[in-house]
Image: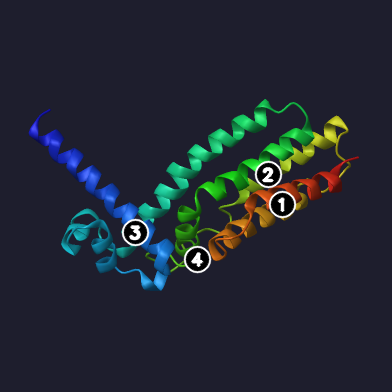
Amino acid sequence: MNAARKVTLTQEVRRRRIIDAAIDCLARDGWHGTTLAAIAAEAGISRGLISYHFAGRNDLYEAVLETVVTTIFAEGSAEMQQRIDSAQTAAAKLQAYIEGNLDFIGAHRREMAALGQVMPNLRGRDGALHASPDAEEPIIAGTALLFEFGSSTGEFRAVDARLTAYTLRRCIDGAALKIVADPEFDIDAYARELTSLFLRGVRS
């Protein structure tokens, strides 16, 4: 391995360490309690090294957002889609969707906590919130397909698929908030109740 490659790997490892430290601080101390100095201390580096890798606090938090949403959530989404695709009936697919989402949230409490701090606070250079109001549109549309499929097979009664999908997403997102606020929250029990509630509500 040549010297240039070693430097690149060192930089990549250090950048990842800074992002991980930022996630830890955000999850533990919140948006206002997290500073670059605190992140540097968490990562075990000097604050100057953060400035070397990131243009500023927003640049770092954008990297946190990308890591959580693009990397972690993308992997979780792929696993969840596999569970849904392998299910044979609309009811089984809906159950896989609900349980898959909540299992993922339960396994990533730290990342969910950090995301909950970044999303409502991170702003772009124009001062607008980084999160677009239309950002969840693909998620709602994809969820609606589950209800449309169930209606097409006759398993589900005719429902407003988009409205029902929106309602389900709010229930799932609510669990993400609850699990951060309450460490004792039983997300497995929540998954069972939510699955039962929606299946009873949409079945023909």
Instruction: Tell me the distance, in whole angstroms, between the alpha carbons under discs 1 and 4.
Output: 21 Å
Task: Mark 1 or mark 3: name the one nearer the start of the chain.
Answer: 3
According to the picture, the residue beneath numbered tag 2 turns out to be: 98
Instruction: Tell me the distance, in whole angstroms, between the alpha carbons under discs 2 and 1.
Output: 9 Å
Outermost residue, left direction? 3
Assess whether mark 4 and mark 1 are in contact (beta carbons under 8 angstroms): no
Task: Mark 2 or mark 3: name the one nearer the start of the chain.
Answer: 3
Within 10 Å of disc 2 (Cα), the crowding (few <14, some 14-19, many 20+) is many
User: Which residue is rendered at x = 32% and y = 58% of the image?
Assistant: 59
Amino acid type assigned to the residue bearing label 2 in the image: Ile
106 displayed left or right of 164: left
According to the picture, the residue beneath numbered tag 1 turns out to be: 168
> On the rendered image, what quadrant is the N terminus found in?
top left
User: Which residue is rendered at x = 45% and y = 62% of the image?
Assistant: 118
Assess whether mark 1 and mark 2 are in contact (beta carbons under 8 angstroms): yes
Task: Mark 1 or mark 4: name the one nearer the start of the chain.
Answer: 4
According to the picture, the residue beneath numbered tag 4 turns out to be: 120
Which type of secondary structure does the marked residue at label 4 adopt? Answer: loop
According to the picture, the residue beneath numbered tag 3 turns out to be: 22
- Report x, y in % for residue 187: 63, 52
Of badges 1 and 4, nearer the viewer stands: 1
For the residue pair 75 and 120, the one nearer the viewer reads as 75
Instruction: Tell me the distance, in whole angstroms, between the alpha carbons under discs 2 and 3.
Output: 29 Å
Task: Mark 2 or mark 1: name the one nearer the start of the chain.
Answer: 2
Task: Mark 2 or mark 4: name the one nearer the start of the chain.
Answer: 2
Of badges 4 and 3, nearer the viewer stands: 3
Which type of secondary structure does the marked residue at label 1 adopt? Answer: helix
- Report x, y in % for residue 138: 61, 45
Assess whether mark 3 and mark 1 are in contact (beta carbons under 8 angstroms): no
**Vertical placement of 123 versus 136: above or below?**
below
The answer to whether residue 138 of the structure is visible from this angle is no
